Image (cartoon, grey):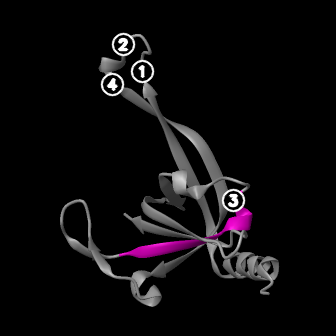
Amino acid sequence: MANFAKLNATATRLIAANGREIRIVKFGNTPQDDEKPWRGRREYLEAEVTTYGSFVPGSELKTTISRDADGVLREGEYCLVAADSTWGYDLREFDAIVDGGRTWKIGSVELIAPGSTDVIYMIEVTR
């Protein structure tokens, strides 16, 4: 049987050593006025996780090229985040990654979890 706890510790150590500090944010989206929801919604910061992430071009991960919202073919870029460093948050519910002064929009999130151990979040991002 594989030792997934050891694999998890290795992933956390390598991403912290080779990545950089990022903030992963989740926006709330509620009506401006509960009694008049047709007036629109307001965005606010609902949750934030500060952790380390390692950015990897899609070609390094052998991923396919996909179309963005404008229909332009783009190769995906990914941010790898150790699941142990997310303070128990499920990153599949988050909206953006703030990397220094640059904000990346989260496209999709895959959780690599052999057995019952969450190891790495593989987050597809676009600018």
Which one is closest to the eye, mark 1 or mark 2? Answer: 2
Q: Is residue 4 left or right of residue 58?
A: right
Alpha carbon of mark 4 to alpha carbon of mark 3: how far? 32 Å
Q: Secondary structure at mark 2?
A: loop
Q: Label 3 belongs to which residue?
A: 86
- Sequence-wise first label, 1 or 4: 1
Q: Label 4 belongs to which residue?
A: 40
Q: Position of residue 1 (x, y in %)?
A: 79, 87
Task: Residue type at mark 1: give it.
Answer: Gln
Query: Which residues are the magenta region?
Result: 76-86
Alpha carbon of mark 2 to alpha carbon of mark 4: how far? 8 Å
- Sequence-wise first label, 4 or 3: 4
Q: Secondary structure at mark 3?
A: loop
Task: Residue type at mark 3: give it.
Answer: Thr
Q: Confirm or deny contact between disc 1 and disc 2 (CB under 8 A).
A: yes
- Answer whether residue 23 is magenta in the image: no
Q: Which mark is residue 32?
A: 1
The crowd level at tag 4 (other Cα within 10 Å; few <14, some 14-19, many 20+) is: few
Report the residue at 65% width, 82% height from top.
18
Alpha carbon of mark 1 to alpha carbon of mark 4: how far? 6 Å
Q: Position of residue 67 (x, y in %)?
A: 24, 70
Q: Position of residue 29 (x, y in %)?
A: 45, 34
